[in-house]
Image: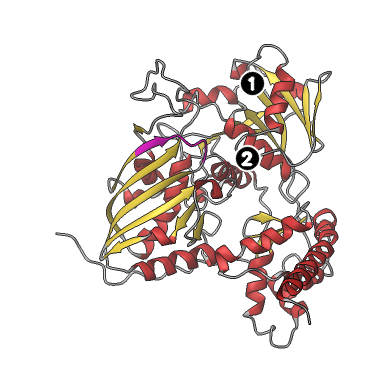
């Protein structure tokens, strides 16, 4: 009789075999139909069998149970028979919706899929957005992560095409060093794919994407059309200019038609948090800001809380990983306290993120205060929202609401949820959500609610920037299954004296 050990090994081998059978099917959907597949934000394309199984295992953090590959394999097989058009499909959400549909009892998966994906069934890969040129001005932490994401999407339904990066000329083997920083990252690991340097053409070639490296210090002096670049969106990662006047220099350059700033914008610039106020972007907007990483982390959660419970007032405390503008060891710095060693100290700092929330959610203007503490970690931060609500709730009700919104709500790409007692900051490196609510840490006392929200201040923010880019350029693939808002109406509001 097989032992428990034998049965566990046999089960693993079976699941591994099913994952291996899924690989060519996912590849066909990707290359023949321009369909990108994933499980709660974890892409399945170009993944090994082990990585596919890990993605299925990850689903337990959302659904409280591991996603069975025995269920998803038939689903993927059925998708390959529909000759789909370009789309982004979340296999976990699609499977969950099928299991609760009227078709599940009869096992009629084909009819379910034809109804759920009616807009793209039989379209034979059609629906790709027209390619749009993207230029990265600056190639630091955010710039390189944006490059990774855009290059990773280059052969998918996304229409973004990274054409160039603009940097100042460095000493020595500048081009090779830039390529090496893209290839290796101490926090986010190695680049997924192949990178080589084309010295003759002064370019980096990443997974077949030809990226021209342009050396310049004057934004207006670059002629991008000389490099075959036109009607491009330029993403300014430097933070050197944050108002319309400074950023308008990019628009004086030939070949640039729009500018996106990866920092809080000043003056009348629109500060966009995707999922919250991205619909404010109009075709006439030539310069917009993607706000800050912290603003992106707290605004979607604040929106949910205000719409469901009402926020009377609150305070946001950010525990933030150190950044490149701090000193590695004690040295002069124009900012207060930031001259002290970032690697050795917790440093109290200011943040405008709480006030910046009001730019995306005007109804919260003057209701939130904020502060920040820089800590000796290289990535992943936490925002602690201490909110006074307009009605009482409980920890159980509030967590149930936030978990449901992370699964089924309109902000599920921005707000994730976890209730593991063992997670720490490094577990969130590489997460694409703007913020992840830690349900076990939630504190509720009547109308007071304290929420702990993790966020990868580098990669999660970069994912939000790409979403803004896709919206600006109309290049975002259609996402399935469709998600409709399911916010509960507010009841029992209490006015403060």
- Callout count: 2
Find residue 171 and report its image quarter.
Answer: top right
Q: Secondary structure at mark 1?
A: strand
Quarter of the image with the C terminus in it:
bottom left
Find residue 209 and report its image quarter.
Answer: top right
Question: Can you give x and y, in whole percent of width and height, for residue 22 in the image?
Answer: 81, 63
Depth check, front residue: 223 or 235:
235
Which mark is nearer the camera, 1 or 2? 2
| Residue with the mark numbered 2 | 188
Question: Quick check: 434 above or below 309?
Answer: above
Residue 373: within the magenta? yes
Residue 223: tell me if it is visible: no
The label on residue 167 is 1
Question: Can you give x and y, in whole percent of width and height, for residue 381 in the image?
Answer: 46, 43
Residue 116: tell me if it is visible: yes
The span shown in magenta is 372-379
Question: Can you give x and y, in whole percent of width and height, for residue 98 in the image?
Answer: 67, 76
Question: Quick check: 257 above or below 279?
Answer: above
Q: Are marks 1 and 2 in contact (CB under 8 Å)?
A: no
Residue for point 71% across, 23% down:
224
Q: Residues within 10 Å of mark 2 (few under 14, many from 20)?
A: few
């Amino acid at each position: 009789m097989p032992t428990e050990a034998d049965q566990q090994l046999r089960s693993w081998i079976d699941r591994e075999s099913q994952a291996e059978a899924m690989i060519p099917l996912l590849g066909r959907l990707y290359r023949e139909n321009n369909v990108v597949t994933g499980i709660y934000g974890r892409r399945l394309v170009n993944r090994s069998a082990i990585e596919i199984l890990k993605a299925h295992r990850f689903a337990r953090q959302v659904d409280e149970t591991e996603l069975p590959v025995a269920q998803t394999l038939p689903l993927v097989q059925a998708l390959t028979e529909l000759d789909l058009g370009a789309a982004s499909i979340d296999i976990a959400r699609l499977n969950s919706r099928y299991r609760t549909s009227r078709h599940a009892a009869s096992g009629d998966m084909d009819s379910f899929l034809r109804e759920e994906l009616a807009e793209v069934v039989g379209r034979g890969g059609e629906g790709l957005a027209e390619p749009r040129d993207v230029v990265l001005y600056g190639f630091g932490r955010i710039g390189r992560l944006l490059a990774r994401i855009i290059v990773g999407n280059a052969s998918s339904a996304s229409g973004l095409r990274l054409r160039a990066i603009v940097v100042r000329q460095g000493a020595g083997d500048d081009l090779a060093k830039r390529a090496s920083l893209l290839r290796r990252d101490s926090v986010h690991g190695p680049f997924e794919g192949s990178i080589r340097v084309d010295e003759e053409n002064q370019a980096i070639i990443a997974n077949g994407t030809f990226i021209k490296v342009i050396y310049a210090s004057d934004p207006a002096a670059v002629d991008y059309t000389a490099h075959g670049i036109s009607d491009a969106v330029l993403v300014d990662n430097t933070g050197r200019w944050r108002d319309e006047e400074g950023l308008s220099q990019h628009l004086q350059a030939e070949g640039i038609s729009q500018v996106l700033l990866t920092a809080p914008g000043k003056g009348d610039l629109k500060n966009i948090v995707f999922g919250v106020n991205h619909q404010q972007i109009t075709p006439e907007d030539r310069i917009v800001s993607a706000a800050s990483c912290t603003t992106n982390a707290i605004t979607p959660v604040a929106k949910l809380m205000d719409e469901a419970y009402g926020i009377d007032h609150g305070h946001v405390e950010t525990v933030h990983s150190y950044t490149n503008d701090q000193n590695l060891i004690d040295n002069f710095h124009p900012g207060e306290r930031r001259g002290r060693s970032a690697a050795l100290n917790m440093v109290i700092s200011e943040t405008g993120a709480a006030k910046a929330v009001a730019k995306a959610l005007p109804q919260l203007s003057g209701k939130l205060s904020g502060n920040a503490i820089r800590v000796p970690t290289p990535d992943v931060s936490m925002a602690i929202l201490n909110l006074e609500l307009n009605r009482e709730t409980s920890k159980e009700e509030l967590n149930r609401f936030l978990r449901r919104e992370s699964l089924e709500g309109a902000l599920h790409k921005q707000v994730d949820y976890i209730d593991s007692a063992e997670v720490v900051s490094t577990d969130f490196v590489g997460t694409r959500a703007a913020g992840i609510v830690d349900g076990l840490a939630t504190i509720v006392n009547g109308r007071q609610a304290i929420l702990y929200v993790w966020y990868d201040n580098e990669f999660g923010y970069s994912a939000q920037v790409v979403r803004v880019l896709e919206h600006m350029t109309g290049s975002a693939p259609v996402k399935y299954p469709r998600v409709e808002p399911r916010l509960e109406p507010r009841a029992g509001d209490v006015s403060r004296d």
